[in-house]
Image (cartoon, helix red, strand yellow):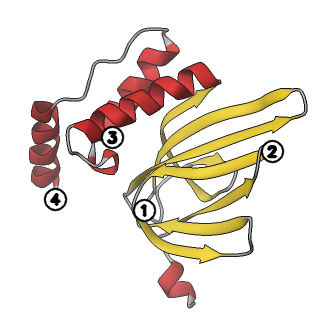
């Protein structure tokens, strides 16, 4: 594939080793999906798209890592934060570590899904809000259809 075709894409390396390491996408619209072998895949996202990347690892004694990052794929020339397995990186909207918090993020994602809204289409500010509320050990406010309509109107006005 040509370099021009790859320009502006954010790539994520996924891995699945049963009961040891799991790196997977919870939501997001893939523009590329490449199977590398039985355990590894490389996926890509278009500029400005939002996706959730889950990382989990364990050993014989239990869970070592349980994390979810919700990222926005950046446009060329924009600054980004580095995230292991994500090239070049992304704008971090939410970063949570520890299974109880990861579970609460899954619940927030499911609540957006229950509104028949793709979580990738939800306002990026919602994911920042969820991150900040969980960091403060508070419950995030639910995403609403009204908030989503306001986001779509604001997004349309910005374009």
Quarter occupied by residue 66: top right
Distance between mark 2 and mark 3 Cα atoms:
31 Å
Residue at numbered disc 4: 159
Mark 1 in CB contact with mark 4 (< 8 angstroms): no
Residue 76: give x, y in percent of width and height.
47, 66
Which residue, given by chain and number where applicable, does mark 3 sit on?
A: 124
Lower position in the chain sequence, tag 3 or tag 1? 1
The one nearer the camera, 47 or 77, is 47
Q: Which label number is shown at residue 20?
A: 2
For the point 48% across and 10% down, which residue is it?
136
Q: Secondary structure at mark 1?
A: loop
Q: Which of disc 4 and disc 2 is earlier in sequence?
A: 2
Tag 1 residue: 75
Pointer 4 local density, CA inside 10 Å: few below 14, some 14–19, many at least 20: few
Q: As drawn, is 154 to the left or to the right of 125?
A: left
Tags 2 and 3 in contact by the CB under 8 Å rule? Answer: no
* CB-based contact (under 8 Å), mark 3 and mark 1: no
Location of the N terminus (image quadrant): bottom right
Q: Are marks 2 and 4 in contact (CB under 8 Å)?
A: no
Mark 2 vs mark 4, CA separation in Å: 44 Å
Marks 2 and 1, how far apart in space?
34 Å
- Of residue 133 and residue 77, the one placed in the foreground of this image is 133
């Amino acid at each position: 594939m040509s370099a021009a075709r790859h320009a502006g894409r954010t790539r994520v390396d996924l891995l699945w080793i049963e009961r040891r390491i799991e790196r997977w996408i919870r939501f997001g619209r893939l523009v590329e999906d490449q199977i590398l072998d039985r355990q590894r895949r490389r996926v890509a996202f278009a500029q400005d798209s939002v996706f959730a990347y889950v990382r989990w690892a364990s050993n014989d004694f239990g869970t070592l890592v349980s994390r979810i990052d919700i990222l926005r794929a950046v446009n060329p020339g924009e600054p980004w934060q580095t995230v292991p397995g994500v090239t070049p990186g992304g704008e971090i909207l939410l970063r949570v570590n520890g299974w109880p918090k990861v579970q609460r993020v899954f619940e927030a994602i499911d609540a957006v899904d229950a509104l028949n809204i793709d979580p990738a289409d939800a306002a990026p500010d919602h994911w920042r809000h969820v991150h900040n509320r969980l960091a403060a050990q508070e419950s995030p406010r639910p995403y609403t259809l009204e908030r989503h309509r306001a986001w779509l109107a604001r997004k349309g006005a910005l374009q």
